[in-house]
């Protein structure tokens, strides 16, 4: 009993250390350069080292989920990798939720992890696994906490949900409405316009989709170079699809 009391006193006297502000600043600087594969490797190593010292630091855990989500998002054409990264994003983000349930980051990245996993295995299979309810629980919580997080990212994810659903659940009008909310507040956010162009194309509005994708191509990426460059690269295929539809 005496040993247990001593151990408890030690825990009170020496609480878990939080990540050093300088470490967080370095992680943010590397995150900004995540279009560079070398910077991503450096970011992975820095996160691993920091988490080894303070594994339950919320600020580190959610940033780990953010990196995994970025990698899952970029695994285009590789469903096997996207499935693994999506699941990892989800799992790490769930830890973040437990550490700080009132913060938006954990809920948001858990939703994106479920979304990436669902895309990889196929939406119909994901629906059969009951992932729709889990996804909506997390993204709706993120929307309640802070819909403007990361320039309206929760709104984008919810809009994409209505786009990805199979008929008759798909709702392209709702999908577009979510993107337009983001564009109104963050006109520089290229992903919102990119998603909107895809939604308009699927909704048989090719002319409007063409105008929207041009805004993506011509937009500045200064708000987030890595994100903007990724979206502009993806826009090339969407533009080709639109031009094919307009013939």
Image: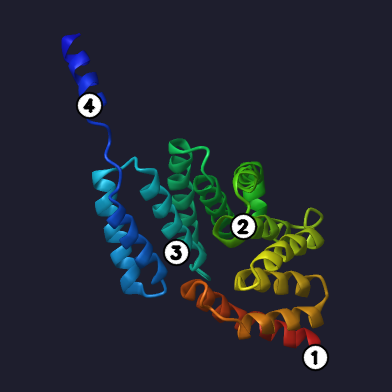
Q: Earlier in the sequence, mark 2 or mark 3?
A: 3
User: Is disc 4 in contact with disc 1, using a CB cutoff of under 8 Å?
Assistant: no
Q: Mark 1 to mark 3: distance in Å? A: 35 Å
User: Is disc 4 in contact with disc 3, using a CB cutoff of under 8 Å?
Assistant: no
Q: Earlier in the sequence, mark 4 or mark 2?
A: 4
Rendered image quadrant of residue 152: bottom right
Judged left or right of residue 146, residue 105 is left
Query: On the image, numbered disc 4 is attached to which residue?
Result: 13
Q: Earlier in the sequence, mark 4 or mark 3?
A: 4
> Residue 37, image x and y in percent?
35, 73
Circle 3 — which element? helix
Query: Dot 4: within a 10 Å radius of its alpha carbon, few (fewer than 14), some, or many (20 or more) residues?
Result: few
Q: Earlier in the sequence, mark 1 or mark 2?
A: 2
Front position among marks 2 and 3: 3
Front position among marks 1 and 3: 3
Query: Residue 71, labelled with which disc?
Result: 3
> Residue 81, image x and y in percent?
45, 62
Q: Give 124 or 89, whichever is nearer the viewer.
A: 89
Front position among marks 4 and 3: 4
Circle 1 — which element? loop
Query: On the image, numbered disc 1 is attached to which residue?
Result: 247
Query: Residue 122, labelled with which disc?
Result: 2
User: Is disc 1 in contact with disc 2, using a CB cutoff of under 8 Å?
Assistant: no
């Amino acid at each position: 009993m005496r040993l247990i009391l001593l151990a408890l006193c030690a825990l009170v006297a020496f609480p878990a250390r939080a990540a050093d502000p300088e470490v967080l600043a370095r992680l943010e600087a590397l995150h900004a350069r995540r279009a560079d594969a070398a910077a991503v490797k450096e970011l992975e190593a820095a996160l691993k080292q920091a988490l080894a010292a303070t594994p339950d630091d919320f600020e580190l855990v959610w940033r780990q989920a953010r990196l995994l989500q970025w990698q899952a998002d970029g695994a285009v054409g590789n469903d096997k990798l996207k499935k693994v990264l999506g699941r990892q994003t989800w799992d790490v983000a769930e830890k973040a939720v437990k550490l700080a349930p009132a913060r938006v980051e954990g809920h948001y990245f858990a939703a994106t992890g479920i979304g990436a996993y669902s895309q990889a295995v196929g939406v119909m299979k994901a629906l059969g696994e009951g992932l729709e309810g889990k996804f909506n629980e997390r993204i709706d919580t993120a929307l309640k906490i802070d819909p403007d997080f990361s320039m309206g990212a929760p709104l984008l994810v919810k809009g994409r949900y209505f786009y990805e659903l199979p008929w008759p659940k798909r709702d392209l009008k709702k999908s577009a409405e979510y993107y337009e909310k983001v564009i109104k507040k963050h006109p520089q956010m290229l992903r919102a316009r990119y998603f909107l162009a895809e939604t308009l194309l699927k909704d048989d509005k090719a002319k409007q989709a063409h105008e929207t994708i041009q805004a993506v191509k011509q937009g500045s990426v200064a708000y987030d170079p890595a994100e903007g460059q990724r979206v502009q690269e993806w826009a090339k295929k969407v533009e080709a699809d639109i031009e094919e539809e307009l013939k």
